[in-house]
Each structure stands twice: as structure tokens, then as C-alpha cells.
Image: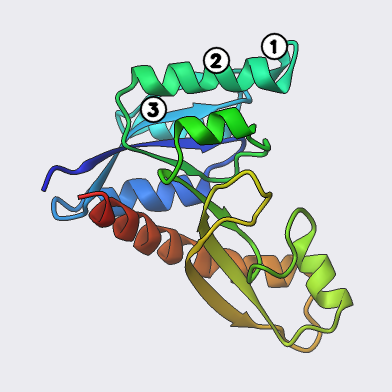
Amino acid sequence: MRRKRTGVLISGRGSNMKALVEAARAPDYPAEIVHVVSNIADAPGLSFAQSQGISTHVVNHRDYPSREAYDRALSAHLTAQDLDIICCAGFMRILTPAFIRDWEGRILNIHPSLLPAYKGLHTHERALADGATEHGATVHLVTAELDGGPIVAQAKVPVLPGDTADSLAARVLAVEHPLYVRALAQLARSLG
């Protein structure tokens, strides 16, 4: 089976992208990370990707008059890279329905909660405020519903007495990396 050409969208340090790049070094991993795009020109993750010999590009959302115009440009750029899969890894943009249609069934996102709980932002704070006893991360297929696509994989962590949003976030991040690696492999294999 041909390894699936995968692009990663980031807005920051790209820690999940780094985990995917490291996993894809294994010749039997079913996906290869071939391109990284950011909407932020100085996103630290771009430097890491470049240091690994991965092509990078910036499509700055501020250069476009609307979300739709931005997503058209982003989708055109990604299409030109001959990608099979897109992984959103800390990409802080809500994608338009038109973009999602272009890549339907081939876009993964990682979200720091056990979906369907805590869609959107500030998931750790909300879990703590609710007195949740467990929290975690979810990889899901991206659909037009924010954080509402089919779940591919989840990982749980306990909420510990005395947890802060930062301590809980650190524990969730530790399970995000292997979770995303597993979910990308699963999607790549399912695409044949």
C-alpha cells in the first residue's frame, strides 16, 4: 500500500505535528508528512518542519477579505500539493463548509476533550468548573459542525484533586500525541 501523503495545518508550536512527523519516520507507518501550512508566519512549528526537510508554506488569513476567500486559497494550495489527508494540529481556524466539502472524509482534527463534551475553547477550565472526574482528547473527522464529526479515537486522563487548567492540559497533551499517531494511521489504512 502506498503511504498516504499528508499535510498538517498549524497555528503555533505544532507539538502534535511533531509527534506525527516522528511516527511517520517509520517506513511501515501508512502516512508520510509531506507538507506543513500555517496561517501564522512565525509559528514555531514551521521551523521544526523545515529542520526535518518538510516543505512549509504560510497562508495568512489576514491577507484575505473573508473566511471563504481564505479557505478557497488554502484549499487550492493544499490541492496543488497532491495530498491524501489533512491533519489539523492546533490550527486555530474554523473551516468553512466549502473547504470541508473539498476534503470530506480526509480531514482529521484533535480536540482537547472527550467529545461530545466541551466543544470549542477553554475545555480544561470548563471540565474543572463542572467537577468532571475524567477528561481527555479526541481525534475526529472534520465536518461542518464544530467539533462534531465522527470520532476516530479517544484517550482519557483522570482529573486529579488540586488540578489546575495548566496541569490538566499538560496531562491531556501527553495522551494527545500517541492518540493522533494512532488515528492518522487508522484513517490512512482505511483509505486503501
| Residue labelled with disc 3 | 50
Q: Earlier in the sequence, mark 3 or mark 1?
A: 3
Q: Earlier in the sequence, mark 2 or mark 1?
A: 1
Q: Find out whether the residues at labels 2 and 1 contact each other: C-beta distance under 8 Å.
A: yes
Measure the alpha-carbon separation of dots 2 and 3.
22 Å
Mark 3: amino acid: Gln
Measure the alpha-carbon separation of dots 3 and 1.
25 Å
Residue farthest to the left, as pictured: 1
How packed mark 1 is, by other alpha carbons closer than 10 Å (few <14, some 14-19, many 20 or more), is some
Q: Find out whether the residues at labels 3 and 1 contact each other: C-beta distance under 8 Å.
A: no
Residue that appears at 83% across and 67% down: 125
Helix, strand or loop at label 1? It is loop
Helix, strand or loop at label 2? It is helix
Residue that appears at 26% across and 47% down: 31
37 or 103: nearer the viewer:
103
Mark 1: amino acid: Tyr
Task: Determine whether, in the image, residue 1 is placed left or right of residue 108.
Answer: left
Q: Nearer the viewer, mark 3 or mark 1?
A: 1
| Residue labelled with disc 1 | 64
| In this view, 19 is above or below 107 | below
The location of residue 119, given as percent across then percent down, is 73, 59
Which quadrant would residue 21 be assigned to in this image?
top left
The location of residue 77, given as percent across then percent down, is 44, 17
| In this view, 163 is above or below 28 | below
| Residue labelled with disc 2 | 73
Q: Earlier in the sequence, mark 2 or mark 3?
A: 3
The location of residue 105, given as percent across then percent down, is 42, 46
Mark 2: amino acid: Ala
Measure the alpha-carbon separation of dots 2 and 1.
9 Å
Residue that appears at 73% across and 87% down: 133
Q: Nearer the viewer, mark 2 or mark 3?
A: 2
